[in-house]
Amino acid sequence: MIVREARIEDAEGIARVQVGTWRVAYRGIVPDGHLNALDVAARTEMWRSVIERPEAAAPWVAVDADQVIGFVAHGPAAERVGEPREGQVFAIYVDAGWWGRGVGAALLEAACESLRAAGFRAARLWVLAENVQARAFYGRHGWVPDGTEQHEDFSGVMLTEVRYRCEL
């Protein structure tokens, strides 16, 4: 497995991992109708546009035998809180068949290294409050909830997201 910056030809693999992981990780949390409506083709187009302008959310991929098995998108935080501005991990997903094999840790570390290199001293991310597995993962890697929550509408169901922070 290698971790590298995403290329335009990785967009479909990123979309496939994102949709597949959502359907496994969020089943029972996010409404089934929302999960079933996720579309790899639409996500592919979205990721193509993100890869073309990485200054907003630079995607990196984990690849095994030329197949995308995970990805992370990171960049400047969407909202400014304090000085200096913080970095943010916008998304991190690993194909369920690769869970527990260090792929997520490698992606998270690559994102943190990239954010450090860009001059950020801290980073944040948002995670669904009910996503116990992801919250444990972040905790194992030094991320802590900072007490900030927001609510997101998933097909008519309001879910709570918790913000985590990490000093870089």
Image (tube, rainbow, N blue to C red):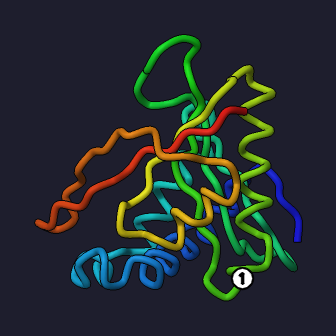
What residue is drawn where x is 77% and y is 36%?
114
Q: Residue furthest top?
A: 83
In this view, the residue in front, 120 or 132, is 132
Q: Secondary structure at mark 1?
A: helix
Decide if residue 53 is on the left or right side of residue 22.
Answer: right
Residue 126 x, y percent position in the rendering: 44, 49
Numbered label tally: 1
Q: Position of residue 47 (x, y in %)?
A: 53, 55
Relative vertical location of residue 23 with respect to residue 6 in this rendering, above or below: below
**Residue 83 placement, left or right of 71:** left
Residue 34 versus residue 140: which sits nearer the camera? 140
Q: Which residue is mark 1?
A: 98
Snapshot quadrant of residue 122: top right
Q: Position of residue 66 (x, y in %)?
A: 83, 74
Up-down relation of residue 49 to residue 130 (above or below): above
Q: Residues within 10 Å of mark 1 (few under 14, many from 20)?
A: few
Query: Which image quarter is the N terminus in?
Result: bottom right
Q: Quadrant of the C terminus?
A: top right
Q: Residue at x 59, y 59 (%)?
A: 92
Q: Nearer the viewer, residue 66 or 162?
A: 162
Residue type of the residue flagged with mark 1: Trp
